[in-house]
Image: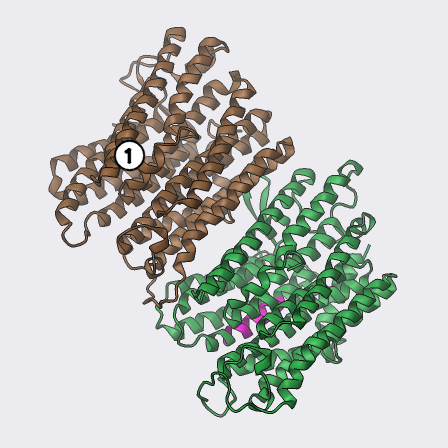
Chain colours: A green, B brown
Amino acid sequence: MSPDTLLPPAIVLSSLLPGLLIFFLKEKSHRLRTALNLGGAVVKLTLVVWMIKGVYDGHEFEYRWALAPGLELVLSADALSVLFVALSSVLWLVTTVYAIGYLEDSPNRSRFFGFFSICVSATVGIALSGNLLTFVLFYEILTLATYPLVAHRGTPDAAQGAKVYLAYTMSGGAVLLIGAIGLQSLVGPVEFTQGGILGDSAEALRPALIILFFVLLAGLGVKAALVPLHGWLPQAMVAPAPVSALLHAVAVVKAGAFGLIRVVYDVYGVDFAHANGLLFALGILASITIVYGSVKALTQDSLKKRLAYSTVSQVSYIALGASIFGPIATIGGVVHLVHQGVMKITLFFCAGNYAETLGIHKVSEMDGVGRRMPLTSLAFTVGALGMIGVPPVAGFVSKWYLGLGAADSGANWVLIVLVASSLLNAAYFLPILFRAWFRAEPGAWPKEHARRGRLETAGALLWPPVITAVLALTAGLFAAAPFSPLEWAALIAEREYGR
Amino acid sequence: MIDSLALAIVAPLLGAVVVTLFPRHAQRLGVAAAVVSAAAALAITAVVWTDGVLRSELGGWGVPLAITLQADGLSAALLGMASLVALSVSVYAGGYFSSPQDGERLADDSRSRHFWPLWLLLWSALNGLFLAGDLFNLYVTLELLGLSAAALGALTGSREAVEANLRYLLVGLLGSLFYLLGVALIYTAYGVLDIGLLAEVIAPGPVAATAMALMFGGLLLKAALFPMHFWLPPAHANAPAPVSAVLSALVVKAAFYLVLRLWLDLYGPITPLGAANLLGLLGAAAVLWGSWRALRAERLKLLAAYSTVAQMGYLFIGFPLIAATAAGPARDNLIAAIVLLALTHGFAKAGFFLAAGMVQKTAGHDRIDNLGGAAQGLPAAAFTIGLAGVALIGLPPSGTFIAKWILLEQSLILGLWWWVLVMMIGTLLAVGYVFRVLSRAFNREPTPYRFVNDARAEIPALLLGALSALVLGLAAQPLWTLLGQGVIG
């Protein structure tokens, strides 16, 4: 077997094996656990860089393993999978550092980091899936691996949140499974192929294929938090901050959105989906979700809940991009997969810092927090402005391409959705920024932890959001540079539409 | 030189005799006998895998007078699973019976002394059943299996256990009686008992139909197919953990194996679709009812027992699909899928019960709502329940996932969507009952975290769980090769 064949499974295993080892570690072996965590993350990142270069040069990375006759595990790399793999590998490294700082001295860390690593392995597996079966396989493993993370704290709230999460995602998984098997029973094994595989399917199959599209959409929509399947997301907020960060930016909701992109472009094919009105239906659903999420975010006083509804709204930009026929909107949707991840993880890191350092959980408690924690608040500001779509933060680039693509394809109603959503984004983020920077500090914070060192909070908590905020800025400022997310998204769109 | 097929039956039998003669050393001798027996059986699986069907006639008279032993791919597959489960259970039992709580040492000691001879006897009967080539020998092994199983189940000596297993004993006897009646009918009509010879002469008609109804009726009772499952939950839930594991993973599987064997070799070709549909229908009812009761069960082991009722149901849903599919790769895949399902469940349920036994020992009871920190304090046991749970639900990468994928795909191709519906509802109910248990492993109380606390008990359970949830799902392909020896292809 050549290295090109083994690279995709190696990337999955680079986090899986350390994760499995971590389970067996004693609670005290802090150093070894950290070494395994960071070692795995660095190895993964190195392998991913190798893969990015390979895919850019046109190498084929494909690994096949027969599970049973006619059922194959396929791990392969195309431009889209590399984008998602790169996103999750970079953010995993940062989140691991953050989580090590965040969970310092709390119980059951071996269990936590074990599942944390499995969770990332599953995400990478989803990214590298070369067929629908493999996708379903990792998609379900992701559900399994995140349940213990949501339930981690063991409080009644955590148990309830985990239960709701499980009920939603398992039902969604079952629906997805039926969709996948249904599709396979009609057209044979479904390999992800640029341009789709159903373009030349028989006319007689069309009604069944259309129904199956909606079955798949329902299955994927749960994790992608499409309204009305989003109910688990705000409840899963009980999880520790690094988990929320991962759930919202990299792993779970992204897995759903990524699946939607795969199904639209690489299974059905954008032409087939457009010709049969599937894109329009997806666009309507995404638009409703975008507006609904933003409206709900307005009224949340809990900071994490506000961010959660913001995720509901923002992730649907990705689906929106996929639903507009034309390469420019595709670029906007695909690049938002990365941009939303970087910005949202920043916001969640910051929310975690406020809670850990000062005991702030509510928006109404944030008066003057900018003076007490300037770097954290600066990072938060960058993330929030990016979500609104203020240049030069990355979010602006996504919205620009979405708007341009909509106008280009004549879907002017999408522009209204974009404007309305941006106004709503501003309406729920700007008050937070105003409180943080322009209101006076209260006499005492809700629950201030003793300072350690000169920094505003522990270093492992402070630097991750600063780094991701810088990334969000860089992705916007240098969007036109080679290997920027935007350039890569353009490469993907070019290959999807390149007929 | 002793025949290799006979060795797999004789080894545990001899072990049973030896542990009876030296009760003081029952523990050590028992484990040693288990290692030898498992090795003998696994050797058969390996040889069948590489060389093809094995057959031997004991006594040297030749068919139809001799005792025929035969191992094809199906026998070898179940034999392999059974040996791994039995070996793990034996290692586990070595620790389980020798580390009693204070004051119980005496009782446990006598339990241990009774456990080993009965258990090795059961194992011998089980191997005999998988290897027997004619209907009468099958009856003998079936009867022996039922008797030793009921005796083992009553080992705790508690009132509930004795009561449940007395019922189990009677049901078992009734089941074998029905089976024997069917065999007698066949013998009077055709004058042969060897399955291979019989398959050549049997013809559709009232005799064959009646014989089949009698034999299947008896076997389905033993396989606890709904609505004949009533005896199973109390019997399996009240036995000591290693015994529950054996009963749920292997003993009911033996009855299922016989049904499948008779169906494939004898009755399938001459039976109308309606009979298969009836089996499927009962299977569907078992899936729904068993899963529902598991969801409502108050005790951990009762939950596992009802889960067995449900999981047996899935196996029978395979029959109408097999019957409706023309011979060829699709039908072969279905047969392999239900065998895979049976194997996966064997590993998973054994692992589940062994882990449940650990939790029960630590907590002093197995009421799910009051488990407190017991599950969290035993990470390896909780993890085992998780792995086994993955297999019971049918999530990837378990063997169940692959098997269900094949069953679901074929149901959709045939347009039999109601089986799809039943399987998916069963799956979601399984999510409910498995996570009802797993959610107890997340508590506020910080526990001193050590992954493995009692290696001798936890490692075998963990390995069984891993086999079901990881190995059989990711490496199921060899099963097709194995079944290719005389069963499919």
Q: Which residue is mark 1?
A: B164
A75 or B174, nearer to the observer = B174
- Determine crowd level at label 1: few under 14, some 14-19, many 20+ residues with C-alpha closer than 10 A: many
Q: Secondary structure at mark 1?
A: helix
> Which is the main secondary structure of the residues drawn in magenta?
helix
Residue A131 image point, x, y percent:
64, 50
Q: Residue at x 48, y 31 (%)?
A: B283
- Number of numbered tags placed on the structure image: 1
Q: Is residue A3 visible?
A: no
Residue range of the region highlighted in magenta in the rendering: A86-97
Above or below, comparing residue A455 to residue B114 in the picture: below
The amino acid at mark 1 is Ala
* Residue B453 appears in the figure: yes
Q: Chain of mark 1?
A: B
Q: Quadrant of residue A368?
A: bottom right
Q: Position of residue B122 (x, y in %)?
A: 27, 32
**Left or right of B471 on screen, residue B411:** right
How far across and how far down the image is residue B306, in percent? Answer: 40, 40
**Residue B59 is drawn in which quadrant?**
top left
User: Any magenta on residue B303?
Assistant: no
| Quarter of the image where the N terminus of chain B is located | top left
Residue at image coords 65%, 43%:
A189
Residue nearer the viewer, A313 or A73: A313
Residue found at x 55% / y 34%: B333
